[in-house]
């Protein structure tokens, strides 16, 4: 195929309608029909990236192989498509303005007034086309963050309007996701919010080709007809997106509604090859028909927020399906755990994951949890800060290093077993300056990590400033902790484990970011397996 086609996904009425999942589902259907497809997200906020926002603001910060800190929707894209995303897949208003302002300072617009139109919109368009210009993709799906009608979304909608004319109407397709609410008192589905939000788009010069209607009840033929008539779309382009119990069902629901077919015919692309969804269906079957059940604790400080550990909970879904079991994830606030109540908090759990994080809030609870898991042979899996806490706990309770801690929480500790990385010492800015992205890790043969991965060279993604302090390495090893994964270039400890324990492993990286439906992450798969074996 010669020309790249562009699909734009906008949202109306309210946020949180699941644009990311719809975009990822459509991409999955196109991909399984043989079209090389990628997705990118444009976010209308002014932060250059979400890296400095806390999870309460933004949910999880997803990290790509090339070290971009991005929106969590990119996690969905990767989990659905099983192909890596990159910095180019997530653009924010902050990044657009930063580029334009840098250009202005360099004198690239010399003599001109720099304006939202054309300079900002040109930069948006340039970035919208970037992935397509690589020649790697048949279809590029662009999700616009925010809701149509927001002031901050205006330049993006304008960029879409311009691109439709520049690229040609047959090479672009606009899908608008809206809400069709059900009024209980009237016993009716209501189309007016959809009509208004489409009108909002039309006023900006953009006519959507397809409407995806999020709804709690089935759309009747009359409702479809009405929406089509008032919004200028074909009736077959009114797609019902009914609530389902798992995000992984959405591609099949969209297949049934023919979202892929309607999109392809709009783009003048062949619909001859049917999507090959055997693997996906196999995964879904296992997800829906578990044979066993396992209870896993997730100890963290953002547990009240559903999106804060998104990739971790999805990785558990993938690993559960692999193990043919349902994984009940029990969130426990680390601040609520003390040495005295830890036994009680953990008594019904088969395994515990100690979550990543920053700062000292809840740190004592994490350490108390790990000590209990270690001493009582309960499977433990620590990620990033979770691994660092395992090192601290072992230092205090096994090595007898009184007051051992991380420099992050206790800058004057006598035993900085977790220290600031050398490369971080000169860093002043907070944004984008952590150790980010994929790095190599060499695994020692015969260790648990080796058994889990089945190989000795791996690459995993990172997001941290602190590391295991190698000055203490010998002491730890003498007392039985095995440093089973090491970065070959700078000797940084990436994996720690305890051989005399059914399953005790901590990793400095974030394996959850690489778990996909097609490739569940081995660490999660084996941790769930170990927890299953521990079921009481
Ligand atoms: N706060 C720790 C560090 O910066 C751990 C980070 C994390 O858990 N992602 O090293």
Image: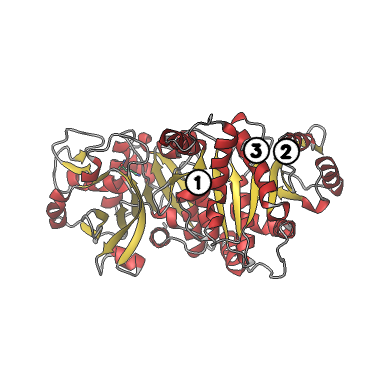
Asked whether residue 218 appears in the rendered view, the answer is yes
Query: For this view, does 252 lie left or right of residue 375?
Result: right
Label 3 near label 2: C-beta < 8 Å? yes
Label at residue 205: 2
Query: For this view, does 322 lie left or right of residue 467?
Result: right
**Residue on which the image places disc 3:** 158
- Percent across and percent down for residue 535 are 42, 58
Q: Secondary structure at mark 3?
A: helix
- Percent across and percent down for residue 233 are 80, 47
**Residue on which the image places disc 1:** 90
- Percent across and percent down for residue 281 are 61, 65
Ligand 1 location (quadrant) = top left
Q: How many neighbours does mark 3 have within 10 angstroms: few (below 14), some (14-19), or many (20 or more)? A: many
Question: Which one is earlier in the sequence, the residue at label 1 or at label 2?
Answer: 1
User: Which residue is found at the position 78% from the left and 36% from the top?
Assistant: 195
Question: Which one is earlier in the sequence, the residue at label 2 or at label 3?
Answer: 3
Foreground residue, 517 or 211? 211
Label 1 near label 3: C-beta < 8 Å? no
Q: Residue furthest front?
A: 111
Which quarter of the figure is the C terminus placed in?
bottom left
Q: Secondary structure at mark 1?
A: strand
Q: Secondary structure at mark 2?
A: loop
Query: For this view, does 526 lie left or right of residue 34?
Result: left
């Amino acid at each position: 195929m010669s020309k790249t086609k562009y699909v734009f996904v906008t949202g109306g009425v309210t946020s949180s309608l699941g644009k990311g999942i719809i975009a990822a589902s459509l991409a999955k259907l196109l991909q399984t029909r043989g079209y090389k497809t990628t997705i990118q997200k444009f976010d209308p906020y002014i932060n250059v990236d979400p890296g400095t926002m806390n999870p309460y603001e933004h949910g999880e910060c997803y990290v790509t192989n090339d070290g971009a800190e991005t929106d969590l929707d990119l996690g969905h894209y990767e989990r659905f498509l099983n192909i890596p995303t990159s910095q180019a897949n997530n653009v924010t208003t902050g990044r657009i303005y930063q580029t334009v302002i840098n250009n202005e300072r360099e004198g690239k617009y010399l003599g001109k007034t720099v304006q939202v139109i054309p300079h900002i919109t040109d930069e948006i368009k340039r970035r919208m086309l970037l992935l397509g210009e690589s020649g790697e993709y048949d279809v590029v799906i662009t999700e616009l963050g925010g809701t149509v009608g927001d002031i901050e979304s205006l330049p993006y909608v304008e960029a879409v309007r311009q691109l439709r004319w520049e690229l040609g109407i047959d090479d672009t397709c606009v899908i608008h996701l809206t809400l069709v609410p059900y009024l209980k008192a009237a016993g009716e589905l209501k189309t007016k919010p959809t009509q208004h939000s489409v009108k909002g788009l039309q006023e900006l010069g953009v006519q959507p080709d397809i409407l995806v209607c999020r709804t709690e009840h089935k759309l009747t033929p009359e409702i479809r007809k009405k929406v089509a008539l008032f919004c200028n779309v074909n009736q077959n382009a009114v797609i019902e997106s009914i609530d389902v119990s798992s995000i992984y069902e959405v591609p099949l629901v969209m297949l049934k509604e023919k979202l892929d077919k309607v999109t392809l015919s709009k783009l003048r692309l062949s619909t001859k090859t049917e999507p090959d969804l055997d693997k996906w269906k196999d995964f879904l079957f296992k997800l829906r028909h578990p044979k066993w059940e396992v209870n896993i604790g997730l100890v963290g400080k953002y547990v009240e927020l559903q999106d804060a550990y998104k990739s971790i909970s999805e990785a558990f879904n993938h690993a559960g399906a692999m193990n043919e079991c349902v994984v009940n994830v029990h969130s426990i606030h680390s601040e609520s755990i003390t040495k005295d109540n830890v036994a009680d908090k953990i008594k019904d759990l088969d395994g515990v994951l100690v979550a990543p994080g920053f700062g000292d809030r809840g740190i004592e609870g994490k350490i108390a949890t790990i000590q209990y898991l270690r001493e009582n042979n309960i499977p433990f899996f620590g990620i990033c800060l979770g691994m660092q806490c395992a090192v601290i706990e072992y230092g205090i309770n096994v090595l007898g290093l009184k007051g051992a801690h991380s420099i992050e929480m206790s800058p004057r500790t006598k035993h900085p077993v977790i220290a600031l990385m050398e490369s971080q010492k000169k860093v002043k800015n907070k944004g984008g300056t952590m150790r980010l992205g994929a790095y190599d890790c060499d695994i020692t043969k015969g260790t648990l990590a080796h058994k889990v991965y089945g190989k000795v060279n791996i690459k995993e993604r990172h997001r941290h400033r602190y590391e295991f302090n190698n000055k203490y390495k010998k002491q730890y090893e003498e007392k039985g902790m095995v440093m089973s994964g090491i970065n070959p270039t700078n000797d940084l400890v990436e994996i720690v484990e305890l051989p005399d324990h059914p399953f005790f492993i901590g990793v400095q990286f974030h394996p959850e970011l690489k778990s996909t439906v097609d490739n569940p992450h081995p660490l999660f798969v084996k941790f769930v397996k170990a927890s299953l074996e521990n079921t009481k």
